[in-house]
Amino acid sequence: MTTRRPTAALALAVGLVVIAGGTAGLLLTRHSTPAMRPAAAGVAALPAPTGPIVAPPQSAAPKPVAAPVSLTIPLIGVRTQLITLGLTTTGELQVPSSTSVAGWYTGSPRPGAIGSSIIVGHIDSRREPGVFYRLSELAAGDKIYVKRADGTLIEFRVASVQTYRKDRFPTENVYGPVPDAELRLITCGGAFDAATGHYLSNIVVYATEMS
Amino acid sequence: MKFRSVFRKLLMLLAASALLLGIPTATAYASSATTGTGWIRLAHLSPNTPAVDVYLYSFGNSNAMIVLHHVAYGTVSPYESVQAGDYSVAMRAAGASAASQPVLSTSVTIATGHAYTVAGMGPESGLRLQVLQDDLTTPPGQAEARVIQASLKQQVVSVSLASATLANGLKFATVSKYQVVSPGTATVTVKAVGANANSSVTLAAGTVHTLVVLDGATGLEVVNLEDASGSGHPPAGGVSTGLGGTAPHGPGSPVPWLVAIGAGCMLALTGGMRLRRNRQLTARI
C-alpha cells in the first residue's frame, strides 16, 4: 500500500501543473491579432513616371503596341516591374512567385491596346504586405501608369473598385472583350481562411485609358 | 380596393426581390457594368456622300457631347464611353453651323455594358443613319467577325475568311451577323460581279472584328475593325494572390486548453483521493 503513495502524490502534482499550464494558455490566446496596418509614413505617394504618353488605339487597323515592362500607381506607392504570367495546368491564372512584383497575363491584350488587359499582384506574403497591399484604397479617377518596352507610357484612370467572392468570380466581366483600352488589377481581399490558407475574395480595380 | 393595394404591394415586393436576385439585369460587361456606362462609335459609310460633321447629343440636351468634324467616307471613330441612356446622333454637311437643321438624325438607346456603331449608310439619295449593336463576347479560344457591305460600285458581295463564308450575296448598305471563326492570320476574299479583293487579316482569340467592304480608288478595299478584345483563354475562377500575413487573426480555439485543464483536474483529483485513502488506511493500522 505504501508503494502507491509516491505515484498518487506525483499524479496530484502533475495534475496541478497541467491545470496551471492550461489556464495560462487559455488566458494568453483569448485575444485576437488585428489586421496589419501600413505604417503611417511608410509609403509616400510617388511622382508620376515620365515618358511620352500615347493616345488610345483606333478600332480601324490598330497598330501593335510594345509589351508592358513596369507599373506605377503614385497614390498608393506602387512601383514595380511587370513579369509575364500564363495559365496553370488546371487553367487558373498564374501568380508571381515573388509577392513584391506584379505580372501581366500574356493571354490578355497588352496594356494600351484595345481590350481588357490583366495585371495581378499579391496583397501579402506569410509575413508582410505584398505589392498590391493597398490596392483597395484606390477610387474612381485615380491614375495608373504602365510603361512599355519602347519607353512609351499609358495613363489609365480608375473607373471602379470591386470585391468579389472567389466562388462567384465574374469571369466574363473581368476577362471578356471590351471595345476600348482597359486595365484590370487583381489581388486578394476579404476574409482570410486560415484552414485553406487563402483569402475568400478578390479585389478587382477596373481602369480605362485616358484620351 | 383593399385587395388591389395588397396586390400592388405584392407586386412591388416581387419586383424588389427580383432586383435583389439580379433576375432582370441584362448581361453587361466589363468596367461599364460597374459604372453604368456603354460605348458608341460613329461612322460614315455612304460612298457618294461628301464629308459630314457628326454630332452626339444626350437626349433633350441641345449642347452636343461629341462633335466629329469633316468625317469622310470610310471613317470609323474610336469608341466613346458614355453613361447608359438615350442619345441622338445628327449629321450635317461638313462645316455647317451647329445650329442648322441636320441632314439626318436618329435616336439610340445605349444600355449598360453594350456597344453600338451608328453609321451613315446607303447612297446619298437614300442616306440613313443605322444603329448597329456590336458584339462583346467570344466563345473561349475563338474569334468573331461580321461584314458591313459599303460598296456602291459592287452592289452585292460575298466575303470569306480562309475557307469560312462570312457573307454570301450581301447587298449594299447591309450588315451580316457575327460569326465565330478560328483565330489566326488568314486571307479575306471579297467576290463581286465586277471586282475581287484579297487582304490578310489577323484575328486573335478573344477578339471581335467588323470587316468593312469599301469602294477604293480602284476596285474594292477591306478595312478590318477591331470591335473588342479580351482574354482568348479566360483563366478559371479567381486568383490566389495572398498568403495571409496581414490578415486579421481571430482568437485561438480554447478547446485544447480546456481539455488540458480537464485532464489536469482528473489527474489531480485521482491523485488526491488515493493519497487520502492511503492516509486513512495507514491511520487504521
Image (cartoon, coloured by chain):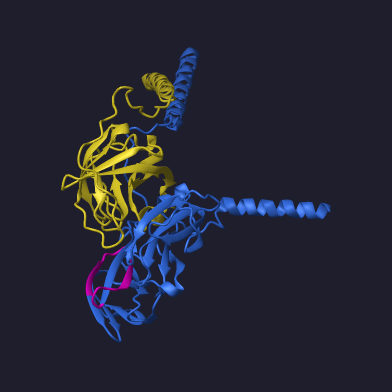
Chain colours: A yellow, B blue
Q: Is residue B205 magenta?
A: yes
Quarter location, residue A1? top left
- Name the dominant secondary structure of the magenta segment: strand
Quarter location, residue A107? bottom left
In the rendered image, the residue lying farthest to the bottom is B193
Look at the image and tell me whether residue B185 can be seen: no
In the rendered image, the residue lying farthest to the top is B283
Give the residues in magenta. Answer: B199-219
Left or right: residue B260 versus residue B217 is right
Q: Is residue A14 above or below residue B143?
A: above
Which is nearer the eye, A137 or A26?
A137
Residue ID at (46%, 24%): B265
Which is nearer the eye, A165 or A77?
A77
Q: Is residue B261 above or below residue B54?
A: above
Q: Is residue B244 magenta?
A: no
- x then y, percent, for residue B74: 32, 67
- x then y, percent, for residue A59: 31, 60
In the rendered image, the residue lying farthest to the left is A150
Residue ID at (43%, 24%): A31
